[in-house]
Each structure stands twice: as C-alpha cells, then as structure tokens.
Amino acid sequence: MGKILSRQALKKELSGLSARRSPAGGPRGGPRIVFTNGCFDIIHAGHVRYLKKAKKLGDVLVVGLNSDRSVSKIKPGRPVNGEKERAEVLAAFQAVDYVVVFDEETPYELIKYIKPDVLVKGGDWKKKDIVGSDIVPDTRSLPYVEGFSTTRVMEKIGRLRKP
C-alpha cells in the first residue's frame, strides 16, 4: 500500500499498526501517531525542517493535506500546485509516513476520526488556536523557521518575472 491514502484506508492502516509495540509507545500500546496538516503548496526548506521535527515526536507521521477546494477557500488564488501533485511531493519525504487529503476548511473531523497521539503545527500557531487541540491532549506548536514562507517564495517569483 502506498503513502497517499483515503480516510478509510488510513484508519485501517493505523489500526493494523496499533497491534505492534513501539519504542515511543503510544497510549494504546502501539506506535505513537503524530498528525499535522496544511496546504504545502510550494515546498521550501521551512516545510522540510518542520516535517522532520514533527516526525521526531512519535513513530508515524500523518500529514492531512488540504484539498484544492479547501485551499482556495482559505487562500484565494491558490493553490499553485494541485492536490495530487502536492500529495505526491509530501509522500516522497522520508519523514512522512502517510498523506490523507481532506476537503473541509479545517481538519477537525479528520483528527477526530484518526485519533492521533500528538497534534502538531508550526510556531506561527498558538497552541490554544490549533484546530483539534481540544481533543488531542498532546498538542504542540513547533518553533517557527524564520525566513521561509510560501508567500515569500511567490513574491520572489513575481519579482523575477517583472522586467
């Protein structure tokens, strides 16, 4: 089975993993499941560093990826890259174990469905504002990686294109 899964296939895969013991040991006795989410439209070094740090918080890293429709609702004019391509890029990272696309504006229902042990977002999020923090007790905001943003990359590309 690949890394890019439907919601149902992911739940089945994670259930199969829970029977195995792990060094980090999640509360259910199986591997510690870490969940993060985002648009991941134009991947940059900040994303790479963030995903590596997120993976270190457990055994399995699941990335919830906003669908194209979801991205366009929260970031007008985006995404630049389609959800299939964004999912493919994320799945290529060693730190990422699974990618699941969600169509809602927030990943709340997905988080509720898969029940991760750790919920994580980047440092531009306050812990109390992280969607799902009310249902995942171990919620973390990782330090923000200064100097990297998709918006900054897009602005730079825009400047390069102007005569």
Image (cartoon, helix red, strand yellow):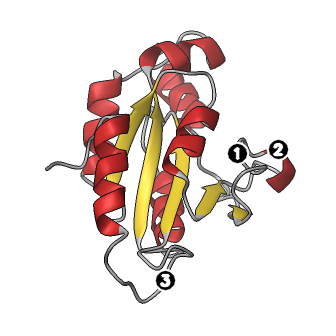
Mark 2 or mark 1: which is in front? 1
- Residue drawn at x 70%, y 66% as measured from the top left: 138
137 to the left or right of 46: right
Residues at marks 3 and 2 touching, judged by CB atoms closer than 8 Å: no
> Is 43 or 21 nearer to us in this picture?
21
> Is 96 or 13 nearer to us in this picture?
13
- Residue drawn at x 34%, y 37% as measured from the top left: 8
**Residue pointed to by mark 3:** 25
Residue 11 point in image, percent of width and height = 37, 47
Q: At label 2, which amino acid type do we have?
A: Asp
Q: Residues within 10 Å of mark 1 (few under 14, many from 20)?
A: many
- Residue drawn at x 62%, y 22% as measured from the top left: 105
154 to the left or right of 93: right
Residue 14 point in image, percent of width and height = 35, 58
Q: At label 1, which amino acid type do we have?
A: Gly
Instruction: Tell me the distance, in whole angstroms, between the alpha carbons under discs 2 and 1.
Output: 9 Å
151 to the left or right of 101: right
**Residue pointed to by mark 2:** 129
- Pick out the residue farthest to the bottom: 23
> Is 25 or 106 nearer to us in this picture?
25
